[in-house]
Image (cartoon, grey):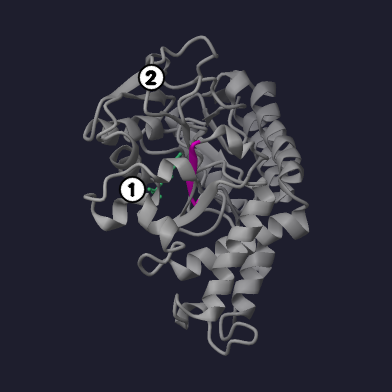
């Protein structure tokens, strides 16, 4: 018997993560043959007219959702956000004769910095590690270089659960953002960015594709001597078909973008729902604040990844197993920080959040 909605758990995984049911159903329905094509998306050439249309529509939907202005390219890349940690300095830092500034607000920013250091002069403009990454710098905190090649930051630290509410004020340097875990969760002013990128498997689709939106001026940088795949310009010139792109993943990102446009009603609408969902979970944490200890400072709490601890590790283990029997899965915090992490991305239904907060209330009442 094929699985039905009744078989689904509420999955709070940080990534790969929950996808909208209507998107999963459409994938299922088109799995034997795309309408008018006669083959599934898994079986057609990336040079075919059918895939060309999928690619164009996916890009068009993203452009519409985010109001991406003229003068920006949208690229579909592989290698995850990790490869971007290297491609960014290879294209924009190496040979620039300038430093790059990094804001370190958690594990991912730190990893991005480590890769950039291999390539050029990557500086720490602000480091949240002394406070165990529970905060975001205020506008006067970072020490910016005089003339940096770019500023890199992580809009949402997936592991620690801290999120910028707006772009850092960094002067005229191109702003580069790792938005892997909050891309498409809220409207953005793309004109503020030199580049913004996100692996899809948190909030925008399945694993396998990374979306990069890059200002065309920046594409002129990067030496032709770089390995071909690593030069952004090659991907832009070839319209993301420099090599075989991850066709299935691009197709799913296109479906997600259409879901946001047509069913959800755009990014302002999903931002509102995301705010309401996060407020419910943080509400329980605050109500039981001697039992649940939130990791992030209140003003920078992530609306995507809610991180908290319980009084003992034993209670955390009980919490996880109790949640599972209620159909609430993947709530274990990242192995590097422990505790509990509830990822409540776009596709997590309000009903899932309600089930979680009810469980949290009951568990706190029973155990505190
Ligand atoms: C998941 C994640 C990454 C790493 O993505 P990969 O696709 O595994 O390389 C980088 N940055 C952030 C903010 C993430 O959430």
Compared with residue 44, is residue 341 higher up or lower down, i.e. above or below? above
Res 83 label: 1
Q: Tag 2: Cα neighbours inside 10 Å, few (<14), some, or many (≥20)? A: few
* Residue at left offset 68%, top offset 53%: 64
Kindly indicate the quadrant of the structure image that contains residue 18: bottom right
Q: Nearer the viewer, mark 1 or mark 2?
A: 2
Compared with residue 173, is residue 130 higher up or lower down, i.e. above or below? above
Kindly indicate the quadrant of the structure image that contains residue 82: top left
Secondary structure mostly seen in magenta is strand
Q: Is residue 187 magenta?
A: no
Q: How many numbered marks have been drawn onto this rendered protein structure?
A: 2
**Magenta-colored span:** 194-201
The quadrant of the picture showing ligand 1 is top left
Picture coordinates of residue 164 (x, y %)?
56, 27
Between 85 and 299, the residue placed more toward the observer is 85
* Residue at left offset 53%, top offset 87%: 39
Residue named by callout 2: 147
Picture coordinates of residue 152 (x, y %)?
42, 30
Q: Is mark 1 within 8 Å of ligand 1?
A: yes
Q: Is residue 20 left or right of residue 152?
A: right
Secondary structure, mark 1, is helix
Secondary structure, mark 2, is loop
Which corner quadrant holds the C terminus?
top right
Between 240 and 16, the residue placed more toward the observer is 240
* Residue at left offset 58%, top offset 66%: 56
């Amino acid at each position: 018997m094929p699985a039905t909605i009744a078989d689904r758990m509420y999955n709070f995984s940080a990534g790969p993560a929950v996808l909208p049911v209507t998107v999963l159903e459409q994938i299922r329905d088109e799995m034997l043959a795309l309408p008018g094509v006669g083959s599934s998306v898994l079986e057609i050439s990336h040079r075919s007219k059918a895939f060309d249309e999928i690619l164009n529509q996916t890009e068009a939907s993203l452009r519409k959702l985010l109001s991406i202005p003229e003068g920006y390219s949208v690229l579909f890349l592989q290698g995850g956000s990790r490869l971007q940690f290297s491609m960014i300095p290879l294209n924009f830092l190496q040979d620039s004769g300038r430093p790059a500034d990094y804001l370190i607000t958690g594990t991912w920013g730190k990893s991005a910095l480590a890769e950039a250091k291999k390539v050029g002069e990557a500086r720490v403009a602000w480091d949240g590690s002394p406070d165990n990454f529970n905060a975001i710098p205020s506008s006067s905190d970072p020490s910016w270089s005089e003339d940096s090649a770019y500023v890199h930051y992580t809009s949402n630290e997936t592991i620690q659960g801290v999120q910028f509410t707006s772009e850092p004020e960094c002067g005229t340097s191109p702003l580069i953002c790792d938005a892997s875990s909050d891309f498409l969760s809220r409207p953005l002013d793309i004109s503020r960015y030199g580049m913004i990128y996100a692996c899809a498997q948190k909030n925008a689709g399945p694993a396998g594709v990374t979306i990069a939106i890059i200002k065309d001026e920046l594409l002129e940088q990067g030496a032709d001597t770089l390995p071909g795949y690593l030069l952004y310009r090659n991907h832009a010139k070839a319209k993301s078909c420099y090599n075989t792109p991850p066709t299935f993943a691009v197709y799913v990102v296109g479906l997600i973008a259409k879901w946001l446009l047509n069913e959800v009603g755009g990014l302002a609408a999903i931002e509102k729902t995301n705010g309401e969902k996060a407020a419910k979970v943080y509400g329980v944490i605050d109500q039981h604040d001697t039992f649940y200890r939130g990791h992030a400072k209140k003003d920078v709490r992530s609306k995507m990844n809610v991180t908290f601890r319980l009084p003992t590790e034993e209670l955390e283990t009980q919490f996880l197993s109790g949640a599972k029997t209620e159909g609430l899965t993947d709530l274990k915090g990242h192995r590097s920080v422990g505790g509990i992490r509830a990822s409540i991305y776009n596709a997590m239904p309000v009903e899932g959040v309600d089930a979680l907060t009810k469980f949290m209330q009951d568990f706190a009442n029973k155990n505190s």
